[in-house]
Image (tube, rainbow, N blue to C red):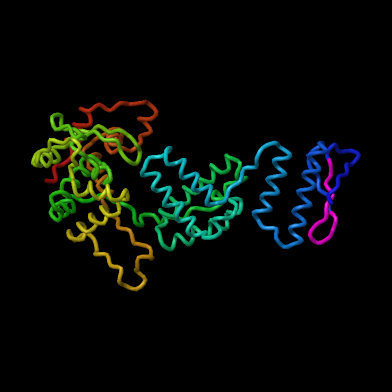
């Protein structure tokens, strides 16, 4: 039976109870309220009795601590399992982040939970820096260093939220170092003019249009695939689009090669009709751009700019880390930037066209007018 005593120089009651091994113990209840102190002492005693019976589980331990905290503070102790917290965090991010960003968050958390397995049902305070380091190293066997670092950054963001909510005391992911990315390794580079001509020659008509739009606007593959006639202003030779990754609205002039391509397409009475139907349908089937990226890679193979991928060779199966190419559809953004710079376009204007955040624009709230951007785009060479 738990009892109470109080030291002469302390206002708080001391709980006296028997430990599972039979020894008597004394613990401060942290309260001068005798009734509350007795409830805390009884909680200590009940926990010790469960321990003697060999039935004191981690869940029960958390419950006892939570009950004592509630008695002392009149509020519930914030706690969560690893899986519950991450799933709750993803739910919040579903309305806070763009669909593309939320998709990356989901992928990262899926990797974490899959690695932890049954441990994901443990309290989140058990997720240590050591465990996260093991996860990082295991993921590095399958993904590139850059992808692993992105996952680790997402984990830091999620656990940062847990710390702010009082669920954990420290952000253990911040204790884990990022992987070193070798300089120049797998770095994206611009296409050369000769390479662009080979790619256009190898592409079918629809992909030819997507490549031209990518080159002369800097838009990402996913945004181009989702373009409809509603986004296009043929009269003023422009495109108006809200980017999927950043949610930024971009109003861009269209270069003459892009206009020539669009003008030869069959007209549509439906403004919601896609510019590139096959790519649009692929995006509707899956929000992941992997299928389209693979199609573009096959164009690179046909153009003689990449090696055909195979999953049949030893140590090169689907579970092994894929070697990244230094040229992808994203390289068109690098190419557009290079062509603009080579044409003498200022850094501020080039960043605005490509959609990169410019320090100068953010600082001075500079507005780049359409005519300035049109002159810049018209200065790019006609690869057709």
Residue 36 is situated, as x and y percent measured from the top left of the image, at 78, 39
Q: Which of 100 and 49 is in front in this view?
A: 49
Task: Identify which residue is drawn at 24% across, 33% down.
Answer: 240
Q: In this view, does 72 lie above or below 283?
A: above
Task: Identify which residue is drawn at 30% across, 55% down.
Answer: 326
Residue furthest toward the bottom? Answer: 314
**From which residue to which does the magenta span run?**
13-24
Residue 18 part of the magenta-drawn span: yes
Q: Is residue 298 in sight in this rendering?
A: yes
Residue furthest toward the right? Answer: 8
Residue 184 is situated, as x and y percent measured from the top left of the image, at 35, 55
Q: In this view, does 175 lie to the left or right of 46?
A: left
Q: Is residue 376 in sight in this rendering?
A: no
Q: Nearer the viewer, residue 265 or 326?
A: 265
Residue 228 is situated, as x and y percent measured from the top left of the image, at 20, 39
Q: How many labels does the image show?
A: 0
Q: Is residue 316 left or right of residue 329?
A: right
Residue 344 part of the magenta-drawn span: no
Q: Quadrant of the rendered structure where residue 364 is? A: top left
Residue 298 is situated, as x and y percent measured from the top left of the image, at 21, 59
Q: In this view, does 295 lie above or below 103?
A: below
Q: Is residue 58 left or right of residue 239?
A: right
Q: In this view, does 9 lie above or below 180?
A: above
Q: Which of 7 and 252 is in front in this view?
A: 7
Task: Identify which residue is drawn at 19% across, 57% down.
Answer: 299
């Amino acid at each position: 039976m738990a009892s109470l005593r109080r030291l002469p120089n302390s206002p708080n009651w001391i709980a006296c109870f028997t430990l599972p091994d039979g020894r008597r113990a004394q613990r401060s209840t942290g309260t001068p309220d005798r009734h509350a102190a007795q409830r805390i002492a009884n909680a200590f005693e009940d926990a010790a009795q469960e321990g003697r019976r060999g039935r004191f589980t981690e869940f029960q331990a958390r419950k006892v601590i939570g009950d004592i905290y509630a008695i002392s503070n009149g509020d519930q102790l914030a706690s969560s399992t690893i899986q519950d917290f991450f799933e709750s965090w993803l739910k919040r991010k579903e309305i806070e982040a763009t669909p593309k960003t939320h998709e990356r968050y989901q992928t990262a958390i899926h990797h974490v939970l899959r690695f932890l397995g049954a441990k994901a049902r443990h309290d989140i305070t058990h997720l240590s820096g050591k465990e996260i380091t093991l996860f990082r190293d295991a993921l590095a066997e399958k993904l590139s260093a850059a992808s692993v670092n992105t996952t680790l950054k997402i984990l830091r963001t999620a656990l940062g939220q847990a710390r702010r909510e009082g669920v954990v005391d420290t952000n253990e992911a911040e204790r884990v170092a990022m992987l070193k990315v070798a300089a120049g390794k797998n770095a994206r580079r611009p296409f050369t003019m000769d390479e662009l001509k080979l790619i256009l020659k190898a592409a079918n008509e629809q992909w030819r249009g997507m490549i031209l739009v990518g080159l002369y606007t800097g838009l990402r593959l996913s945004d181009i695939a989702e373009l409809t006639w509603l986004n296009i202003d043929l009269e003023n030779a422009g495109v108006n689009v809200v980017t999927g990754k950043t949610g930024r609205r971009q109003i861009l002039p269209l270069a003459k090669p892009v206009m020539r391509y669009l003008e030869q397409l069959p007209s549509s009475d439906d403004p919601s009709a896609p510019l590139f139907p096959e790519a649009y349908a692929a995006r509707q089937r899956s929000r992941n751009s992997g299928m389209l990226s693979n199609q573009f890679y096959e164009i690179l193979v046909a153009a003689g700019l990449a090696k055909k991928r195979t999953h049949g060779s030893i140590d090169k199966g689907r579970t092994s880390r894929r070697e990244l190419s230094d040229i992808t559809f994203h390289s068109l953004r690098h190419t557009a930037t290079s062509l603009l710079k080579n044409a003498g376009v200022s850094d501020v204007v080039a960043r605005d066209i490509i959609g990169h955040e410019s320090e100068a624009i953010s600082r001075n709230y500079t507005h780049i007018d359409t005519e300035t951007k049109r002159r810049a785009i018209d200065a790019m060479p006609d690869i057709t």
